[in-house]
Amino acid sequence: MRNEKYSVIGSRQPMIDSLPKATGHAQYTADLALPGMLIGKLLGSPYPHAKVLNVDTKRALSLLGVKAVVTGADILGKKYGFFKSRRDETGLARKARYIGDPVVAVAAVDEETALEALHLISVDYEELPAVFDPEEAMKQGAPLIHDEYERNIVASREFNFGDVNRGFRESDYVREDRFSSQAISHGVLEPRAALAQYDVSGKLTLWTSTQSPYFVRRDLSLVLNIPESKIRVIKPHVGGGFGGKVELGPHEVAACLLAIKTGRPVKICLTREEEISTTRLRVPMIVHAKTGVKKDGTLIAQHIKCIADGGAYASSSVLLMYNSGLTCMIPYRIPNFRYEGHMVYTNKAVSGAMRGHGANQPRFAIESQLDMIAEDLSIDPADLRLRNATQAGDTSISGLVFNSCELSKAIKESIKQTDWRKKRIQQKPYRGIGLACGGFVCGARLGGHAASGSFIQVNEDGGVTLMTGSSDIGQGSRTILAHIVAEELGLIPSDITVLSGDTETTPIDAGTFSSRVTFYAGNATLIAAQDVKTQLSEIAAYLMETNPNDIVFKDRKVFVESNPESCLSFEELAKKAESLGPGRLIIGKGYWAPTNTQFPDRKTQYGNVSGAYSFAAQVAEVEVDPETGQVNVFKLTIGDDCGQVINLLGAEGQAEGSAAMGIGHALMENIIFGDNGQIMNPSFLEYKIPTAQDVGDVCVLEVGSPDPVGPYGAKEIGEGLLISTVPAIVNAIYDAIGVRITELPVTPEKILEALEKQKRREYHASTS
Amino acid sequence: MKRRITLNVNNELWEVEVEPHRTLLEVLREDLGLTGTKEGCGLGACGACTVLIDGAPILSCLTLAVDVQNKSITTIEGLAKDGQPHPIQLAFVNYGAIQCGFCTPGAIISAKALLDRNPKPSCEEIKEAMSGNLCRCTGYIKIIKAVDEAAESLTKG
């Protein structure tokens, strides 16, 4: 959406760092090498639950080229983890809690020697009883994975707004259904890598593929017992994250321990197998949804119960289980709402944050169920949603404040664009059309550090350097922030150099997660850019003998509004500014956190947890092959309210990438666990993500209006869109073949089985 | 036992001593310092390590370095001419086909192989040729568009 008053905001621009990526010059962590560097490797537990009794490292250490071996006994500090209340990891386990849980690490002169050393290490284990199913793990008497958590419940969140029981009594129609969703790998193309260096002064430097240098430093400080100020974390280019790389990982701990022990740089690069089976997964969840409506489809009451399979460690559990409930209340007006969510430890790989962070699973359930209700009541699913859609100015019953919301417009535009009403009744056989909605936070309010900050320096030649703590992990935040600086200073985005994600040289920033970067770092950068503009305006006004408020910055020029001909170039102004009077530097700074949010009330969970909320409606069009069960999602139409778009090319890229991921989640991706909780498909050969041939058309409709809090009115787009893609596809499949699949993913096997059952039912009906 | 071999990479001859089991990917990245070629899976499933060998797209993680002596190897670093990026590289930049960029070198190499043998591919041909290069960020639409636009600009000359 172009707004005439802006030069850069809303325009379509290539990412400022894409040329080095296109030529192979952009460096990712695995590309880095230091003199004397050793290569590290991790050894994981072969048992799902076992105490490490003894590690015999003698044979490994006597192998030529092996420099050090570290185990859990070398961990001198405290446990770490995403939340203070749930710190349960040490990096190298003394009690292994899933197959692959790293217990030993080795550093050697090259990868081959390190791998050979792993074979020479013998570990004595005491096997413990294990549990793999979350519902089993919650039963009294199940083996405890972490002693302090009764019934293995690591996080429970409950809230109750209005009177749900009365709401159900007052409803004309109530439905109850059970849904489940699968474990998913983030499938980022860059496997995690870390390079650690420890110098004689006691400074530890870690280059690592992370979404949050801040969290990595904080948790390294805890586990290594080194002050944060003695740790520097640098984020080189990162090959995707999607939530998986937000936390400290065992390989990072191990690289640091080995670097400290050997005094030499140590690099550990995970293999794809390790990346899939020993890092983080999207949390599998069972969702019970009970919804009550009036005859006309008005939502009266909803009760959502989630049981999440947390795997071996807590990770983001507390926030994740909160999100699952909170995000239920974003897209629709619900007067009575109750939520119970439990995350349970199991002896499997760890569940953590992934794009949508807890919102996806209940939204799949709710959007599926709304379609079921619409059919039961003979209401068009689009009308059902329009009747209940959140409107700008609403406050949800849980205290979420929606200053901006264009969900109704998103629904109307996407159904108009797709000719929805006609296609609903006149479709070719095995073709279907489905709709779903969603909404998401723009950075959920967290306890602890939440603000973002920026420094801007204007260089003598008019070049501008922005230093931001935010982490570009490929989503394009460098470019977004460069747009903001360029807009304020009348430059073009490529005039701006963006340094990001280095705990020593850029401002402290919590990192990239919760779709917060454009919102938080964008506002911080806007403030810093305005600071620079104010300083330069004063100098320009002095030189032009006018009022600073009359100075305009445009097209790399600075002039008085009434007299654009008489202008200075930005470069001239920068040069003059620095030599004016006794000399000066033009440095701007800004930090920002929303003032319109609250930490939710501890008892009731009431509160506005985000400064703004994004909204989306999506229409999926599919064709099902009844012979093979294959589904072709040939078109996705996305009505997207992300507020004011900052970079149209980037926004489209987020929407299209999310669409492909949604197709993968809905139809093909599934982490398969074996009898001992081990991951059976830890490679891209067996764990299939969409290819160029699996993606159809994606049409993105910009329906947003500027939000009063976001920078220039921008809201998030990175996470929220994925939430509604999956149910839109599943609803379209129902429209195509008349069978409702409630367990993700919708594989060809499930479709064929359902079609077979349907045929049998029809046969029995015709013969009885 | 290491063997002394000569590799022709990006029209430069490199003499290296390698063990026979080392992959071309390892030798490119570790011995020649050409880290533009990426390792995404090490099993030939993701396409991030694609290079051209005598013009054909090959997965360097499944290719032994000793097997490609006397062949012409082109990596992503060899595409620019006289400091100017190749039109395919520019199209990837300008049409937003790059997000995290990790799959990009392999994808651009696959696109080059396609356009060298088929200068005017259809959309379906592009999708097929690019289907061995996994990308988790872009959703492929802008990659397909970039290859199509690059074809256009290359045929125009």
Image: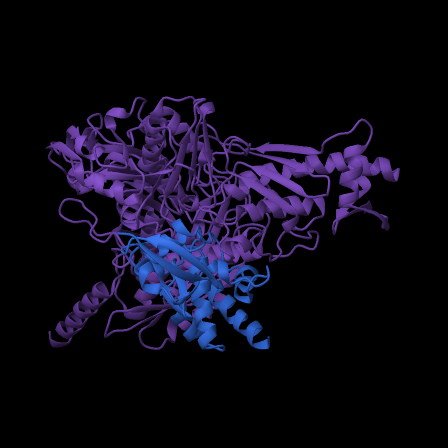
Chain colours: A purple, B blue
Depth order, front residue of A630/A393: A630
Q: What residue is rendered at 68% in x and 51% in y?
A: A6
Quarter of the view holding residue A709: top right
- In the image, farthest residue toward the front: B4
Q: Could you tell me if residue A601 is visible in this image?
A: no
Depth order, front residue of A330/A141: A141
Which image quadrant: the C terminus of chain A? bottom left
Which image quadrant: the N terminus of chain A? bottom right
Q: Is residue A280 above or below residue A88?
A: below
Residue A75: give x, y in percent of width and height.
29, 25
Q: What residue is rendered at 66% in x and 48% in y?
A: A495
Left or right of A766 on screen, residue A188: right
Q: What residue is rendered at 45% in x and 58% in y?
A: B105
Left or right of A452 on screen, residue A302: left
- In the image, farthest residue toward the right: A545
Q: Is residue A188 above or below residue A701?
A: above
Left or right of A21 on screen, residue A285: left
Depth order, front residue of A380/A717: A717
Depth order, front residue of A21/A41: A41
Q: Is residue A596 above or below residue A367?
A: above
Q: Could you tell me if residue A142 is visible in this image?
A: yes
Q: How many marks?
A: 0
Residue A668: give x, y in percent of width and height.
29, 60
Q: What residue is rendered at 18% in x and 30% in y?
A: A58
Residue A132: give x, y in percent of width and height.
17, 42
Residue A468: give x, y in percent of width and height.
56, 37
Left or right of A696 on screen, residue A288: left
